[in-house]
Image (cartoon, rainbow, N blue to C red):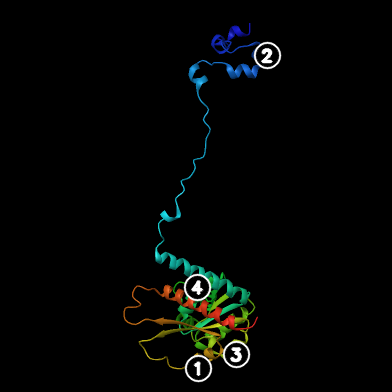
Amino acid sequence: MLFAKCPHRGSRLQQPSSHASPQNLQNPVAMSRHAVWPGKHSSTAMSRPVQAQMAKKPDVVPASELPKPHPKALKALEKLKMQDVNTRALLDRLGSVGFTVAGDNTELNWLIAQQIAKRMSYFSVSTLRILSGLHKLDLKTTSRQALVEKLGSEQRLVEEEASILHGLRNEKRVVIATIADGATGQRSTYRDLWGTFIIHLDKVDSTAGPKPPSPSRQVLQSNAEVKVEMKKGKGFSDTGITTEQQAKAAVDQFMINMVRLYSQWPE
């Protein structure tokens, strides 16, 4: 009586004809495995081969047939390896000692500080940007002159930058970019810079004469541990070279000089 209400009982419940055996009739799993269901061709269902998914073996190209790398690429790779070696050697000697970049150009000080921090995995800070933020100046357009106008005098600028350097005296793994002709031109400032490595940044123009001496420049030269020069080329040698590229080249040479300097000092 139950099957009378199912109109498709004949087609859905038909017994398999060719693979039924007493053992299969007692095993429902075996019956379902050998049953031929309607809607599928029996020969296709029973004769379809089982294909194993085999991983294709990659073609091996002999080393002699590989294309040779470009000489410029090899040179660039060798330069990167040397940069990494110099950086690791310098980090091993410095530990967590920071840097203070001081020079005649505030923007260049900040640019060099960023490049050194990037190479050493340090943090870079700018006293100009800190003071500009404290006095609500736009960081995108701020400058030394704008900060002097905001503070009212050069002496006020020197005093406030000196207080910033005093607050940063115990910071580790930091590269500080200072303001040109600011607090680093005062001898009293260096009492708070004993825990950093002082870098004198100087942009040299070979086509112009030597820079005139100044009291702040003399103080910086007498207190700096190392000098970094950004040289301006002659004629068309600087054509197409950005200031950032010049800064990277200067930092490359700085790292080499620092490794040489530390190699001469005892452990």
| Residue pointed to by mark 2 | 26
Q: Amino acid at mark 2?
A: Gln
Question: How many angstroms separate mark 3 from mark 1 (CA)?
Answer: 13 Å
Q: Which mark is residue 235?
A: none
| Residue pointed to by mark 4 | 115
Whether residues under marks 4 and 1 lie with C-beta atoms below 8 angstroms apart, the answer is: no
| Residue pointed to by mark 1 | 215
> Which of labels 3 and 4 is toward the front?
4
Question: How many angstroms separate mark 2 from mark 1 (CA)?
Answer: 108 Å
> Which of labels 3 and 2 is toward the front?
2
Q: Secondary structure at mark 2?
A: helix
From the viewer's side, name the closer residue of 69 and 238: 69
Quadrant occupied by the N terminus: top right
Which image quadrant is residue 37 in?
A: top right
From the viewer's side, name the closer residue of 24 and 140: 24
Q: Amino acid at mark 4?
A: Gln
Q: Which mark is residue 188?
A: 3
Q: Secondary structure at mark 4?
A: helix
Whether residues under marks 3 and 4 lie with C-beta atoms below 8 angstroms apart, the answer is: no
Question: Which of marks 1 and 3 precedes in the sequence?
Answer: 3
